[in-house]
Amino acid sequence: MSKIRNTIELAKLSWGVLKKDRELLVLPVMSFVASLALLMPLGVAALFMLNIDATASEESATNPFVFVLGLFALLGLGVIGVFFNGALVAGAHERLVGGDPTVGSAISKAFNRISGLVPWALLTTTVGIVLRALSERAGWLGALAIRMVGVAWEVATFLVVPAIVIDNKRAWDGVRTSSSLLKSTWGENLIARAGFGILGFVGLLPGLVIGGLLFSVGGLAMVVGIAVVIVWVASVLVVTTALSAIYQTALYLYATTGMAPSGFNQSRLAESIGSR
């Protein structure tokens, strides 16, 4: 419970930093728009290849072009997600070291680190694809073991993007740096990541309740309810994504320098990363 409370405190501190640079919230929105821009033409191309006919479902399982499009889509989404996460980290880092970031400066820094971010995106997305494929072909016990491997991978690589953006590491060097920093504290960081998930879930509840009540009324209220849920969920996802990136950045700075960055409490970061 103390670790969860600590995560909540870190989220509050992250929120304090985010309030100084609310324009960084634009970055997750840009990531979503870029993802849609990628998926829409690929979806049209896939439907065209399948001729939108009665055998589409059968062809989709065997058509090699659809498979290639699907793989390209997954890798593309991975690159987009990692790039904009890198931009968020860049903006958070600029603020935490005393600067005044903008959306432009954050994206510019991410572009400067593209040689590390893109290989990392391709690597981690490929790992995810392979683990999912293995999980689908394994029994329930094997699938559980593979999921645990996936969680361990996510925890061990939690600080790869900050390593690439802040210290200009290459993808594999970033993996080694992240693993080295967290190899003895993965439990604490796993709880921290779960804590952000819990905070996000709690944040979703009011919107889901209000939307559900409006939906149950029917008519125009039902349409309003659907709109409320969509906007609320999107807003919570945008905020939690930004908060997680700020936390990620602050934790990396503390782990590599031993000092708390501006806006963060030294003892709380020490609790989060454990004794070094």
Image (tube, rainbow, N blue to C red):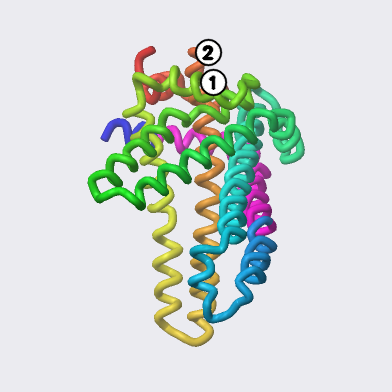
Q: Few, some or many C-alpha atoms within 10 Å of disc 1 (few <14, some 14-19, many ≥20)? A: many
The picture quadrant where one finds residue 35 is bottom right
Q: What's drawn in magenta, residue-wise?
A: 8-37
Q: Give the number of the disc on residue 204.
A: none
**Quick one: quadrant of the C terminus?**
top left
Task: Residue 99 in the image: state x and y as whole percent.
Answer: 69, 26
Q: Is residue 175 left or right of residue 276?
A: right
SS class of the residue under badge 1? helix
Residue appearing at x 64%, y 39% in the figure: 83
What element does badge 2 sit on?
helix
Q: Residue at x 62, y 33 (%)?
A: 119
Residue closest to the far bottom: 219
Q: Would you name the residue on which mark 2 appears?
A: 257
Predominant secondary structure, magenta span: helix
Which residue shows up at 40% across the image and 80% down it? 216
- The local crowd at label 2, few if under 14, some if 14 to 19, many if 20 or more residues have their Cα within 10 Å, is few
Q: CA distance from mark 1 to mark 2?
A: 6 Å
Of residues 25 and 252, the one nearer the viewer is: 252
* Residue 241 in the image, given as x and y percentages of width and height: 53, 44
- Contact? badges 1 and 2 (CB < 8 Å): yes
